[in-house]
Each structure stands twice: as structure tokens, then as C-alpha cells.
Amino acid sequence: MIRHSALFRLKESKGTEGERSFLAALAALRAIPGVQDFEIAREISPKNPYDYAVSMRFDDQAAYEAYDSHPAHVAFVQSRWVPEVDVFMEHDTVVLAL
């Protein structure tokens, strides 16, 4: 199983229509085949520069790669993520079976 997560801060201020629009567009990515356990969360710790997190999981590398190259994901990254996200950190991990 692969977990894909990103912590991010928007250029848009919190509580604005721009924020709501961005998060709604992000949430639409949950409809891409192979995406499981999709969540968007708001950061509560003052220890880092991020305001939000998005996370999801995939059964395997092939499902993750299909998501990454899916036209809806590519379009979102180009039209929303790149111009509207101020700073982010992406985190992709394989869950260890211990």
C-alpha cells in the first residue's frame, strides 16, 4: 500500500471564496480511479508553515502512477496547484508490513 500526502499553504487567505474553491477542486480528485481514503485536513500545530494537508492511499505503485498521470490530476496541478499554492511538502511512502 502506498500513502500519498502533501502539506501545503495557499496564497489565498483563509476563509475566502478562493480558499473554498481551491479545496473543492482538490476534493474532486477523490473521484479518480484507484484513490482510496482521500482526506483534506486543516493544520492545527503552529510548529510548521503549512495550513492544510491532503492524503490518500493506493493499493500499489501502478495505481499511484495512474493517478499521477490521470488527466484530471494533471489539469488540477497545472491550473490550480501551481498558481495557487505558496509552499508545500509532498510525502509518498510505502507502508511496511512488520
Image: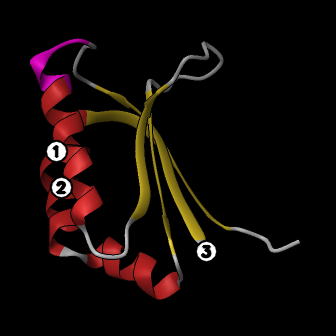
Measured in 3D between alpha carbons, the distance from the residue under mark 3 to the one under mark 1, in whole angstroms, is: 25 Å
Q: Which mark is residue 76?
A: 2
Question: Is 57 placed left or right of 29 in the picture?
Answer: right
**Which circle's residue, 1 or 2, is located before the other in the chain?**
1
Q: Nearer the viewer, mark 3 or mark 1?
A: 3
Vertical relation: 79 (above or below) 65: above
Residue 85, percent from left and from top: 30, 36
Q: Residues within 10 Å of mark 3 (few under 14, many from 20)?
A: some
> Which residue is labeled 1 in the image?
25
Residue lying at the far front of the rendered structure: 37
At 12% from the left and 32% from the top, the residue drawn is: 21
Marks 3, 2: nearer the viewer: 3
Amino acid type of the residue that numbered disc 2 sits on in the rendered structure: Phe
Q: Mark 1 is on which residue type?
A: Ala
- 59 is higher (above) or lower (below) than 78: below
Q: Nearer the viewer, residue 44 or 77?
A: 44
Q: Between disc 3 and disc 1, whose residue precedes?
A: 3
Q: Which residues are magenta?
A: 15-19
- Calculate the distance from the C-alpha at mark 3 to the C-alpha at mark 2: 24 Å
Q: Was residue 89 drawn as part of the magenta stretch in this picture?
A: no
Residue type pointed to by label 3: Met
Q: Are marks 1 and 2 in contact (CB under 8 Å)?
A: yes
Q: Quadrant of residue 37?
A: bottom left
- Which residue is under mark 3? 1
Q: Secondary structure at mark 1?
A: helix
Res. 1 image quadrant? bottom right
Of pointers 3 and 2, the one earlier in the residue sequence: 3
